[in-house]
Structures are given as C-alpha cells and as structure tokens.
Amino acid sequence: GAVVSQHPSWVICKSGTSVKIECRSLDFQATTMFWYRQFPKQSLMLMATSNEGSKATYEQGVEKDKFLINHASLTLSTLTVTSAHPEDSSFYICSARVFGAANTEAFFGQGTRLTVV
Amino acid sequence: RKEVEQDPGPFNVPEGATVAFNCTYSNSASQSFFWYRQDCRKEPKLLMSVYSSGNEDGRFTAQLNRASQYISLLIRDSKLSDSATYLCVVTLPLSDYKLSFGAGTTVTVRA
C-alpha cells in the first residue's frame, strides 16, 4: 500500500524556537495532505488541510501564523511550529488520501512527538 | 456534541474472549466509516472499512446502523496482539474527505 513518511519521529526543543516537521508520500502523489494533533488519551484533531500549490486551509481555532504549512510539491508537505511553547507539546501526525474517492484508506505518517521545554 | 463518540473503555478481556463496542456519530449525512487501530505512541492504521451491509475480516466484524447512527466492532477469539486503541473514523459530508476521529476505545487482552 501507499506509504507516508514523516520526519522527525520525535523532537525536543526549547521554548521560543521553531520546529519543522516533514511529511512525504513515497509512492504516490498527494495533492492533499492533512495535519493532525493528538493530546494524550484524546482523539486526533484536524489542524489543517494542506493543498499542493495553494494555501492551506486551517480549522477553526488553529493559528495559521503559528502553524505554518507549506505544500510545495506533490510529495512533500511541511508543518512548522513557530515560537513553540510547552502547550504545543503534542503528537503531530500527517496523512494523505488518494483524492477523488471517499471510501479509500487514509495513510498516516509515523507521527512526530514534540516536547517543548 | 462531539461528531464521533466512543466508549473509552478500557475493555479488559482474557485471551479467546469476544469483545464488542460501539461508536456513535452525530451527522446523519456522514458518508464513509472506518475502524482504525492505534498502538501506543504510534500512528493509526486502517483495520477495516465499514460497509452498509456489514462486513467481516477474519476475527473482526463491523456493522453500520444508519438509522441509529452508530457503528460497531466485534473481535472474536481475542489475541494478546489485539491490545490497542480502536479509533472510530467518519468521513464528513462535503468536506473534501476530511476524517473525524473518535477518541478511541482501549482494549487490553490478558493471558
């Protein structure tokens, strides 16, 4: 099946710094990727939809200036957490689906565990 | 009201037991339904799609009840390796195939 690779798998950073997370589709072209955040014992919450060649669509309550998304190619989307704070510590996961079919599987990256100290 | 709600469990069952749990969704126009499995600190992985007529995959059986807006998952002959969190996932209508996740039901199978 399709593979989505996410990097890094974990990162620890100091408050105030920025962290970039990469999400790559390895064997298919992903015109749309999704970025989620998951806090312990909670569901995955959609943060934004990343569209190749255009601006990302953010969910209500997600600050677009804090969570910068770039989807410059059909195989790569990046999420940059700017000026990270301890409350941004979470599990961030990207996913991609074969666009055009509602009932197809979503493929997830391995996730990035971010800890801000 | 949350879009997708699940009993968080945990369901603690012995090997070989049958365990079943439900998930309810709030939007009657929801289009597609899935069960994903998530192991601790890992990404979700598709367990099975849920079809209107119900479907079975080995020891796993999924059912969809549109009238009552719930889906169910039944695991027969539980194995230790079935221990995980099971996520109910729904595709919202007219949403570019966005997925809405439940918080998960934790199942622990003991020897």
Image (cartoon, coloured by chain):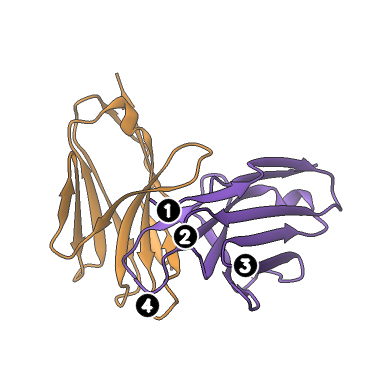
Chain colours: A purple, B orange
Instruction: Report whether A19 appears left or right of B75.
Output: right
Which quarter shows the N terminus of chain B?
bottom left
Helix, strand or loop at label 3? It is strand
How far apart are the alpha carbons under marks 2 and 4? 25 Å
A113 relative position to B26: left or right: right
**Mark 3 falls within which chain?**
A
Q: Are marks 3 and 1 on the same chain?
A: yes
Q: Nearer the viewer, residue B5 or B62?
A: B62
So how many labels did they put on this image? Answer: 4
- Badge 4, how many Cα within 10 Å: few under 14, some, many 20+? some
Residue type pointed to by label 3 = Ser
Callout 1–callout 2 Cβ contact below 8 Å: yes
Given the current orientation, which residue lies at the most extreme bottom position? Answer: B94
Which residue in the structure is indicated by mark 4? B93
Q: Position of residue A101 (x, y in %)?
A: 34, 71
Asked if A88 appears above or below B38 in the picture, the reply is below
Which callout, 4 or 3, points to the residue nearer the camera?
3
The Cα atoms of the two marked residues, 1 and 4, are separated by 24 Å
Disc marking residue A2: 1
How far is mark 3 from mark 2, CA to CA?
Answer: 12 Å
At x 61%, y 61%, the residue is: A76
Taking the image as shown, residue B87 lies to the left or right of residue A112, namely left
The residue singled out by tag 2 in the image is A28
Sequence-first tag of 1 and 2 = 1
Determine which residue is flagged by label 3.
A73
In the displayed structure, B52 sits above or below A7; it is below
Three-letter amino acid code of the residue under disc 4? Pro
Q: Earlier in the sequence, mark 3 or mark 1?
A: 1
State the mark number for residue A82.
none
Q: Marks 1 and 3: in contact by CB < 8 Å?
A: no
